[in-house]
Image (spheres, rainbow, N blue to C red):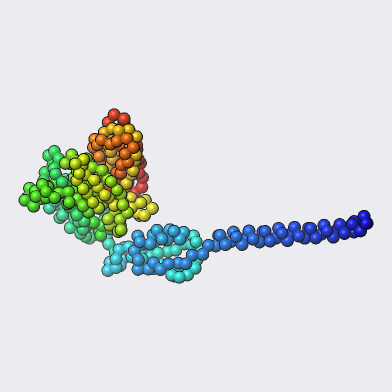
Amino acid sequence: MKEKFLKILPYSGYVLFVSLGLLVFFVAAFLVVVVRTKDEQKITMPSVVGKNYVEVHNELQRLQLKVRLETMRIPEKTDGIILTQSIDAGKEVEAGSKIYLTVNIGFDRVTIPDLKGQDLKRAKAILEKVLSGEVYVPLPIGGITYVPSVGDEPPDTVVDQIPLPGKETHSGEKIYLLVTEGTNEKKASQSNSDWDKELIGVPTPFAIDALQRRKMPYLIKEVKKPDTREKNGSVENLKITPKGAEITSFHLSPEEKLKYDYESVRYQIDDKDSYSAILSYTDEKTGNEVKREIMTSQTLDEDQTIHLVFYRAGKTKLTLVGQNTGEAKVWNFKGYY
């Protein structure tokens, strides 16, 4: 019996060796298939020709495509429209593939002029002839918000603007102006009756400035996603209450917007106090530091949640300060257009 077992033993070892080898082979083959399948994840290329790049940017990012932009100028076509795509629509490609898009630059490139301190008539004249290369082009006015004068500000004078001066943009971007009230009957009637209704649809920072100038406290009760990008940063609703103004504002989240302009922050108050919110940034034209209060001495309760919405260009700091408790929160924003 012992001799028979010894004769079988070599064959058993051989079978065991072969079995282990096959097992290792199949495991390795399985892993290779899994890894290759993962690495070669396929996606179907969408059709983007004829669409505005702003509208498809997020979708292309979701598909993990590496987008490379090229530009062409066809004035009669809409600015931002995609003219060509390097990968045909409907084709299956690997996630992470590089795609080249040709985007139309239908507008002239311009630098936003500085209108602050100009009377409204002069500001309009400046916007009618803005230099673009060797030609002059007009810039459209998106809206004019009238506010009471502060100090020695003369009537019908531009005291703020969006976008800020110096921004490199295209001639289709709308300019919003904050202007001191004039003396004519129409503007006087607006300032005395339905002035709050005039703030619906205007940039939120301008609405806040109008309230601040009237020494009226405000709270942004809700920040909502707009249905169009053009509404980003504007006021959806404003209601006057015995405690002040309640605002509902539109704002796109960081991943949904393609440029740095309007910002929104949220904060829960730790201690009841009188708070101010201060924006500080460097004026690129003069090099001087600029500080602006976007909320002045408002009493906020412990555990109360506040929203702040403001406009910026470039590097900006927002500081929330309690009158008795000191600095409560600092937000730093970086990045340019």
Q: Position of residue 155 (x, y in %)?
A: 11, 46
Q: In the current view of this chain or complex, which residue is farthest to the front?
A: 242
Which is more toward the observer, 293 or 223? 223
Task: Tell me if residue 279 can be seen.
Answer: yes
Residue sitting at x 86%, y 57%: 9
Side of 63 relative to 202 (left or right): right
In the rendered image, the quadrant that contains the N terminus is bottom right
Up/down of 59 relative to 181, above or below: below
Measuring 21% from the left and 52% from the top, which residue is drawn there? Answer: 200
Query: Horizontal and vertical percent for residue 190?
Result: 11, 50
Left or right of 296, for residue 67? right
Q: Quadrant of residue 38?
A: bottom right
| Between 222 and 34, the one nearer to me in the picture | 222
Q: At 41% from the left edge and 60% from the top edge, which residue is drawn? A: 59
Q: Residue 93's x, y, as percent?
A: 50, 66
Residue 169: in sight, yes or no?
Answer: no
Q: Left or right: 189 with respect to 29?
A: left
Q: Residue visible at 46% across and 59% down?
A: 64
Of 168 and 145, which appears nearest the observer?
145
